[in-house]
Image (spheres, rainbow, N blue to C red):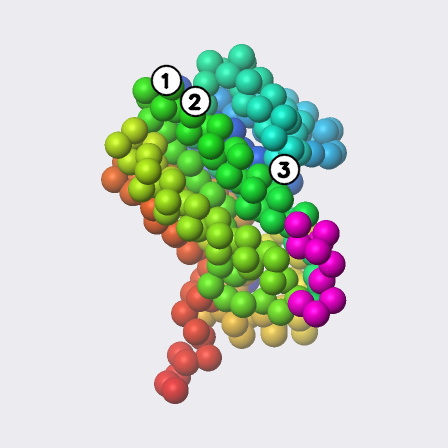
Amino acid sequence: MSANINQEQSAPQRLRGRRALVTGANSGIGRTIALRLAREGAAVAINFVKNPAEADEMVQEIVAQGGRAIAVQADISNEQQVDAMFERARAEFGGIDALVNNAGFETQHPILEMPADAWRKVLDVDLTGAFLCAQRAARQMVEAKTGGAIVNISSVHNVIPWGGFAHYCAAKAGLDMLTKTMALELATERVRVNSVAPGAIQTPINQNVWGDPAMLQDLLRKIPSERMGQTEEVAACVAFLCSDEASYVTGAILYVDGGMTLYPEFRHGG
């Protein structure tokens, strides 16, 4: 199941002089993204809601390697906290050139039993929170006349239904239309907006799956590549989309899923 990815390998300095904000950045995929952007030369604002020690440790790691980083606590579903977060980033870095909307969460409820409050909480973070952050980032980019990049972390469940997670699927599908519409509106301002849609990525939060041989085998049957992805594979795609190498890419949804969205049941014919 290994991907032979070296986290410590030298990263290209495509983002030197850029300023990035990554939401939900102190664990999992977000952590790897933030560290990758820093390795590529960006100053990074590390957003978190809880566990400040993890964010502070990341700041220390980046600074120790000669980079710049700050930790910023904010609940992205709270408009006032989002405003304060972007003002802090502006005060520290002078503005933002790249936003990675990574923060999100999910809860499991069958549709007939899902409380409206559970629905709202997931939509508030995964969709409305992403909108608030993207809007604030875009405003700074347009005001500065520098352009910039916004990357929304979506999911294969923007197109794959997932029983018990209707709110999460709806949020991710909505996020991708937000991506496309913002990309359309902001293209003349040189603000690029794209989505990265991960599939089954190995993180501590899903250890109950990859740590159980039977559950892992069941999952791998759904993935043509027959392995889980690594957080570094997602981060590499995000770094590309934040860089000038993707200067003609906007409104795209990049799947990082080992082929999960390719209807693997049909790989041997109908």
Q: Residue at x 52, y 25 (%)?
A: 44
Above or below — where is 70 with respect to 183? above
According to the image, label 1 marks what residue?
144
According to the image, label 3 marks what residue?
77
Name the spot of residue 18 as percent of width and height, x first: 41, 23
Instruction: Write down the region rendered in magenta.
Output: 111-120
Name the spot of residue 125 as percent of width and height, x first: 62, 43
Q: Residue at x 41, y 45 (%)?
A: 179
Tell me, yes or no, if residue 199 can be seen here.
Answer: no
Please tell me which of labels 3 and 1 falls first in the chain. Answer: 3
According to the image, label 2 marks what residue?
140
Quarter of the picture holding the N terminus: bottom right
Tell me, yes or no, if residue 77 can be seen here.
Answer: yes
Above or below — where is 144 with respect to 107? above
Left or right: 207 in relation to 69: right
Q: Do the numbered discs 3 and 1 sit on residues whose CB atoms are within 8 Å? A: no
Report how far apart the C-alphas of labels 3 and 1 lie in the structure. 25 Å
- Amino acid residing under circle 2: Gln
Q: Do the numbered discs 1 and 2 sit on residues whose CB atoms are within 8 Å? A: yes
Q: Quadrant of residue 146?
A: top left
Q: Nearer the viewer, residue 218 or 157?
A: 157
- Amino acid residing under circle 1: Ala
Left or right: 11 in relation to 26: left
Report how far apart the C-alphas of labels 3 and 2 lie in the structure. 19 Å
Left or right: 128 in relation to 55: left
- Badge 1 marks a residue whose secondary structure is helix
Please tell me which of labels 3 and 2 falls first in the chain. Answer: 3
Left or right: 240 in relation to 101: left
Report how far apart the C-alphas of labels 1 and 2 lie in the structure. 6 Å
Circle 2 residues within 10 Å: few <14, some 14–19, many ≥20:
many
Residue 181 shown in magenta: no
